[in-house]
Structure formats: structure tokens, C-alpha cells
Image: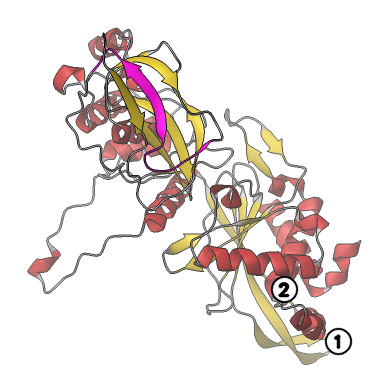
Amino acid sequence: MAENNTITLPDVGDFKDIEVIEVLIAVGDAIEAEQSIIILESDKATMEIPSPFAGKVESVAVKVGDKLNQGDPIATLSGGAAESTEDKSKVEEPAPVASEAEPAVATSVAEPTAAAAGAAKAEAVPGKTIRPHPGAAADAVMANASSKMIHASPSIRRYARELGVGLDQVIGSGPKGRIVKSDVKAFVKTALAGAAPGAAGGGISIDPMPEIDHSKFGEVETVALSRIKKISGAHLHRSWVTVPHVTQFDEADITELEVFRKSLAKDAEKKGLRMTPLIFLMKAVVKAMQEYPNFNSSLDASGENLIMKKYFHIGIAVDTPKGLVVPVVRDVDRKGLFELAAELGEISIRARDGKLTPSDMQGGCFTISSLGGIGGTNFTPIVNAPEVAILGVSRSKMQPVFIDGEFQPRMILPLGLSYDHRVIDGAQAARFTSFLGQVISDIRRVLL
């Protein structure tokens, strides 16, 4: 009688009640050891859970939407024994959650190479998959594609997704045909050498940064980046490389706005709320997006159409001890100032306490990054793709402004609007910031 093996959720670190977002196996399937069987989603991360056994699936104990913890049963296999030679006691660092319009590719590539840089450029064509150039290498790849099962660890599968590579095209050089990192790199180099279709000019070709032993020059200390910084840093790098950025700078007179804001401060305080300038900026941005709908859009996967959004969800960049996160405030157009103040205060606290859920950071239409409470005169924010624009706000200051034949002291707020030049041209951006400045200067315009 064949031995049955029960697969349970291993130690996945400091995560509880992790939601199942995809089940990759079904009863009757024959699976290999280390083949991914389910995908879980936790705080700003997804993780693939591999099977430690090979065999036939006799039963599946989970479904999409279930919440799992360490030790919970996932599936039962028959006809196989443990084959994994790797330590499965702890799942490796999770990959980041993908936003609604982007693939799960936000984890940084561990070893930046010319091939990886080229692949990043290739991603500028949405939905693109790297294909090899015709020839013997391509023939070998296609022959490999006919194999029924792909032998690759979750980390290699994630690495391949980051570079847009289908593992069914890669020849494995490891034991039993296992695909290792060098195989994926070699495939990318081969594909780029043949000028991957759709990649103008064959992609960006740059030399990798040289490895430098900094300790030769003095005492050093190596400090690991936080998981949030790794995830957000890679996402920002991809956005910077693939989105043609332009930044439009402007100013807004917020003298009257400040008077109105301070007049509401006492009422807000009674409700336990802080009436910050950011709340008014959110309403003003929505008004500007309604006037210029292209700013509330995203490119589709083909890069040939715009997805025009009819909702107004605003992302707010929040600085936390572990790095930058962007929770999303939904339906800003439908909420009043006090309601927005309450919601903004709540998500800011949860962000700094590390208690945001993945859904809290998805679905944004436009992002505001405010450094007004810290300082600075202007900065260039990076577009939070797949959004097409982001507003950077610096510290306001009192300045003399020439009005009606005389200089008057006015509170001036610096604005920096970065935008995706594939969707928005310079004239549109200038009109947007000009209109935004008018609304901010007279916040009553949001009622029009």
C-alpha cells in the first residue's frame, strides 16, 4: 500500500492568518518535489509554498480565501517520498504583492547585470515576454519546453518572473534538469543578443557596478535593508527605468486655504482629528483629475490603450521606520474633510505600526508625496506605476507677491508633478498644475 504524506504549512516567519490566493494543484495531479502548490498573500507580499514530496494528489485541504497558519494541512499525496534536498523548515523571503495592473515583479534582482538591465527595459513594453533569437539555442529551448514538469525552486521562479522569462523556455543545467539562476541569466543574454521583439534598440546595455571592498579605506558596517525598502526600492527602480519621466514644477498660493484650515482646527480637535493641509490637497487633486481625466488612467497591457478610471482613490506616501509605504484612501471624491482626516490619521498609524494589509496599498489612481513637514524647496517624485502621475509637495513659506500694484505677504506652496510622458504631454501637465493651483488657492472651487 502506497504511503500517504500530508503537506502542512511550514514556518513562514512572523505572519499569521495568511490568505490563500491561488491553489495550483488538484486531486489526481502528479507533482514533483519542490513544485509550488499554493500561493499565499500577506502584508505587502506573496509567497509560493512548495511541496516537500513527490507523488499523486489524493486530497486538497484548502481553497482560495482560506486563512492558514504554521502546521495547517494543505494536501495529501500518495506514492512518493520526500525528495527535497533543501531545507524546507522556513520559506524564503516573500515576493511583493502585485498591484491590480502590474505583474508581481517588485522584488529587486539580486545581481544587477547588463542582461537584467536590458530585461528591465524590455518590460517597458507591457505584457512582454522575452523570446530567444532564431537558431540552435532557440531550438534547444523549444525542445525543453515540451517537457511536462519544470524543476525550479520558488526563488528561481520568482527571479524568472522579474525578468519576464517563461521557465518552459529555459534549459536547466542543475541535477535532474533543475533550472538554476545562471540558466535564467544565460537565457536572457541569448534573447537580448537576438534583439528581443518590441525592445527598441535591443534594450539598455550597461556594465554592472563594480564590486568594491570598502573596508580597505576604513571601518565599515554592513546593515541589511528592511524588507519594505527592498520591495519599494525595486518597484521604484522599475518605474524609473520603464516610465519616461518628466517633472512640471509650479506654485500655489495657500494663504486663504490656511485661514480656512485653521478655522476648522478646533472642531477637528473636538473629534480627535488633525486637519492637515494634505486633506485639502487630496480634494483639490481629485478636482483636477476630474477636469483632466488622463491623469486618472493607466496604460493597458498592450501599451496601446488607456484604461480610464471612474473612481478616485488617492495614494499617500507615508514614511515609516522600516521604509516608504503608500496606503490608498478610496473614494476621496465622495468623502468630506472630517471623514478624510479620520481615515488619513488611521492609515498613517497602521502604516507606522506595520499593520497595513496588501489591499490597503492597491488600487490607487494618483499618489501624493508630501515633504512639507520636513523641509526642502522642490523635488522630483517617481511615478508610482501603473499610475501615470504623482504630486510632490514641499514646505510652504511666506513670500512677497506683487498684487494690485504692491507687494503682499503670501503663503506659497511648491509643487512638483512627475508624469508618464507616454500618456501626458507637457502642455497637459502645465494645465493640470495651473488648475490645481487655482483650486488650492480657493478651495471653494471643489464645490463647483
Q: Quadrant of the N terminus?
A: top left
The mark lying in front, picked from 2 and 1, is 2
Task: Specify the color scheme.
Answer: secondary structure
View extreme (front): residue: 1
Measured in 3D between alpha carbons, the distance from the residue under mark 2 to the one under mark 1, in whole angstroms, is 18 Å
Residue at image coords 45%, 38%: 40
Q: What kind of residue is marked 2?
A: Ala
Q: Label 1 neighbourhood size at 10 Å, few (<14), some (14-19), many (20+)?
A: few
Which residue lies under the disc numbered 2?
252
Q: Quadrant of the C terminus?
A: bottom right
Q: What kind of residue is marked 1?
A: Asp
In-image side of 27 versus 248 (left or right) = left
Question: Percent from the top left, x then y, of residue 424?
Answer: 65, 47
Closest to the observer, 327 or 401: 327
In-image side of 429 versus 231 (left or right) = right
Question: Percent from the top left, x then y, of residue 141?
Answer: 28, 13
Tell me, yes or no, whether the two marked residues, 2 and 1, touch with CB atoms within 8 Å. Answer: no
| 113 in magenta | no
What's drawn in magenta, residue-wise? 66-80
Q: Where 207 sits versus 350, above or below?
A: above
Residue at image coords 16%, 30%: 85
Q: Label 2 neighbourhood size at 10 Å, few (<14), some (14-19), many (20+)?
A: many
Residue at image coords 27%, 44%: 112
Q: Quadrant of residue 135?
A: top left
| Badge 2 element | strand
Identify the mark at residue 404; answer none if there is no mark.
1
Question: Percent from the top left, x then y, of residue 324?
Answer: 48, 62
Q: Where 433 sits versus 240, above or below?
A: below
